Amino acid sequence: MRSLLGSHDLLFVTLDTLRYDVAAGRLAAGRTPNLARVLPGGAWERRHTPASFTYAAHHAFFGGFLPTPAGPGPHDRPFAARFPGSTTVGADTWVFDAPDVVTGLRAAGYHTVCLGGVGFFAMTSAQGSVLPGLFDEAHWVREFGVTNPACFEAQLERLAAVLPASGPLFTFVNVAAMHQPNRHYLAGAAEDSVESHGAALEYVDRHLPTLLRLVTSRGRPCRVILCSDHGTAYGEDGHIGHRFAHEVVWTVPYAEFTLEAGAW
């Protein structure tokens, strides 16, 4: 990340609530072809999230603590707040003197844009304003949220309208589609399930090219971080939802890759 700072735009996408097993399974079945085009080696990386729900996970992410590789470490981080004694800062880690990466990127000359999805980005309450309040500009309307089957499309329409013509850009998108309720992505479904969760990911995959075209349309290469913030349970060991410790909650898909200008 350090070697790309300034020369590359940055895109950080959290596929809210997406389970690793569902992401990997849909990919293996050929159901997410656009993700297959961009994932390094055509595969998701299996990682562990630092928190079990959106608010806590994103505080960690913005502080420099992205999902950790599932194998033994230590593992160098792409970016990190300057902190004495850190053992995960490597030669290409970008170290910033700020409490969060959004503030650090602004100080480095980046314009920062947030397109929220779930309620912690809704700016309809004091708590829902904390994370989007870090950005130069933050956008949220009800159509971006969990109840709209076309939520990702609505976010993309807004991004197209606000995308600056030039200058270093950090774009953050929190995609709400996989979060409950997601039954509307599976024809005839009366309840949310692992299957409707997967169908929601397929919906996002269909519209992913639009996002990638937008972020590479400004004549600059773009470094992309694409991951889930946590998973969710659909009855495993009696659990429903998240914000507790369980394999399907802690294990998330992750990817990093670079897109050249105009590649999409």
Image (spheres, grey):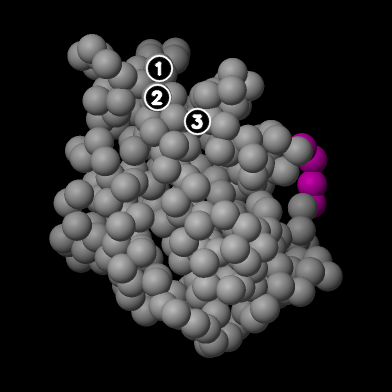
Q: Which amino acid, mark 3?
A: Arg
Asked if the magenta segment contains residue 73, the reply would be yes
Say above or below: 51 vs 20: below
Q: Position of residue 51 (x, y in %)?
A: 49, 45
**Which of pointers 3 and 2 lies earlier in the amino acid sequence?**
3
Q: Residue at x 83, y 70 (%)?
A: 91
Mark 1: amino acid: Glu
The residue to which callout 1 is attached is 195
User: Can residue 99 be seen from the camera position used here?
Assistant: no
**Relative depth, front residue between 43 and 247:** 43
Residue 167 — which label?
A: none
Q: Which residues are magenta?
A: 70-74
Q: Which mark is residue 199?
A: 2
User: Is 122 positioned to the left or the right of 214 in the image?
Assistant: left
Cα distance between the residues tagged 1 and 2: 6 Å
Q: Taking 44 as reference, is 165 above or below it?
A: below
How far apart are labels 3 and 2 at the CA level? 12 Å
Q: Nearer the viewer, residue 219 or 259?
A: 219
Q: Quadrant of residue 37?
A: top right
Cβ atoms under marks 1 and 2 closer than 8 Å? yes
Residue under label 3, please give it.
Answer: 19
